[in-house]
Amino acid sequence: MDNLVIETEGLTKHFDEISAVKDIRLHVRKGKIYGLLGRNGAGKTTIMKMLVGLTKPSKGTIRLFGKPFGKPEKSVLNRIGVMIETPGFYPNLTAAENLEILASLRGVIQKDAVRKSLEHVGLPHKDRKLYAEFSLGMKQRVGIAAAMIHDPELLILDEPVNGLDPIGVAEMRRFLKELAEECGKTILISSHILSEIDLIADQIGIIHDGILLEERNYQELKEENMQYISLRAEPVERAAYILDEILKIRKYQVGADGMIQIFETEKETRQLVRVFAEQGIFVDEIYRRRDTLEDYFKKITGGGGIA
Amino acid sequence: MKKMKRQKTVAIIAFIGMLLPAFCTILCVNNHYRFRNLVGMNVQFGSFLIAPFIFSVLLLTLFSLEEQNDTWKNILTAGISKSALFLSKITAALTFVVLFAGINTAYTMAGGVVLRNYDPDFIRVFSVFLVTSFAAVAGTMPVAWLIVLLRRKYLIAMIAANMFVMFNFILVWQVTMFRCLELRLPILLAYRIIYPVSILEYTDNLRTGLDTLYYPAEKGILILSLNVIGSLLLAVGTGKRQEE
């Protein structure tokens, strides 16, 4: 577990009587992109705020870079780049002027740090346009530039693609992947755009009503739970018997609609049909299916969509 | 300071900061007053009205700038503590008070040329304005707590801070009336301990005033210091509680 950049144990936050998050056990590995998924108000932002010391946890512990994180210290915070909620900047200043202030607060000594971080997010360095005149997408880009200005090892980004146009979203995705794969940066990203997380995340955590329901390696999750063979055969009890006793399949489930989902996807559908026929049962429907992350999210949270 | 760039409030304050000393100077020139009258007037109106006004409005602007634009999180996640942040804002507001003392001195020296008993000692006059402005700000320091307390309600905070400054000024203005000399309010003590400093040229009349107004400097400085420390601690404590 040496390669854990973020590790939390029993992380809990109460606001008066209300629990915002309960008993969160988060494990973010070095050089990986961790996608934190949850509906609005699920507790994603509260977790992120606690990770950077903006909110004190009511209970539980945080370890950052392998060391306990209690009181926010500059030495630790300087290793983290943060963008939480909407980016906050001074509207009376240009993007470069805003970043210069941040660079001085962070103690950045490289003279071209502001220019480089703006170029990374596709914004001109010598633009006289004030921040107040920026579009939502441009503001979001400045927020990401600010998070990276001091070249941090860990990036904590709360809904970073909000407000970006499709090209901007694709660019951001490529950029974040590059940061993780080529520069070895660790990224904790929250989003309600599941298709985006689907394309970039190495690990995912699903949070619902303040509880972390699942934390998995995304590739493993896709292989184990999101791909399955869907089968309909009557009677269901007899079909289940064949799966258990003859085909020796253990990982399957019977849905309320009578559809059977078989997660051992290495089985050939032709073979399944033949075995069922040999046992005197006709298969009405059989097909391979791959759940989208949204389908999986709905299944896990037991609710509707994420938005 | 960079954050104040292109801020309308700052431009307005700068304008007011230049307007009043100019007005006092013109008034003294037109009435052929002595140079010491001009200094006294600029101490009373400049140091005890405009300087605390500049300090409180700028401090409020600095707080509301962070509050309204949600920039606290950028600063706090850069590892800057809330106390350090608060003190840096106080320092920035005080810098403008120093600038104002400079402007006040420049106007006074320029206007003084045509007045009687002109003493072209720029350093001395600047010291008078600086010391009196700082004393007035120290006496007004509870405004810092008021600003922190109301920082999320900009308009109410602005009204409350200005009313507090104005009330303090009225007390100073009427210091010898309404039994004000019996009160131990910080702003009155600030005025009473700096009074000897602001006198450039002694007369019997001023000596009588001095006897009446005199308050022991050591005791006054101690009370003012306690007022500043108490207000700042209260403001920092309030700020921390609000974040929790």
Image: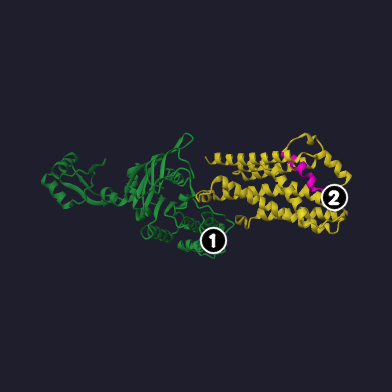
Look at the image and give the residue range highlighted in magenta. B186-201
Q: Position of residue A37 (x, y in %)?
A: 38, 47
In the image, B142: left or right of B188? left
Q: Position of residue A58 (x, y in %)?
A: 45, 37
Q: Residue at x 18, y 51 (%)?
A: A269
| Chain letter of the residue carrying label 1 | A
Q: Secondary structure at mark 1?
A: helix
For disc 1, the marked residue is A96
Q: Nearer the viewer, mark 1 or mark 2?
A: 2
Instruction: Specify the quadrant that holds the N terminus of chain B.
Output: bottom right
Task: Find out whether residue B200 is within the magenta segment.
Answer: yes
Residue in view at x 14 percent, y 51 percent: A271
Q: Badge 2 is on which residue? A: B201
Q: Is residue B11 above or below residue B240?
A: below
Q: How many marks?
A: 2
A278 or B10: which is nearer to us?
A: B10
Name which quarter of the figure residue B154 lies in: top right
- Identity of the amino acid at label 2? Glu
Question: Is residue B77 visible to us here?
Answer: yes
Per the rendering, the mark at residue B64 is none
Q: Does residue A21 appear in this view?
A: no
- Rendered shade, chain A: green
Question: What subunit carries mark 2?
Answer: B
> What kind of secondary structure does the magenta stretch mostly adopt?
helix
Identity of the residue furthest to the left in this view: A278
Whether residue A231 sits left or right of residue A219 in the image: it is left
Question: Residue B122 falls in which quadrant of the image?
Answer: bottom right
Mark 2 secondary-structure assignment:
loop
Q: Are marks 1 and 2 on the same chain?
A: no
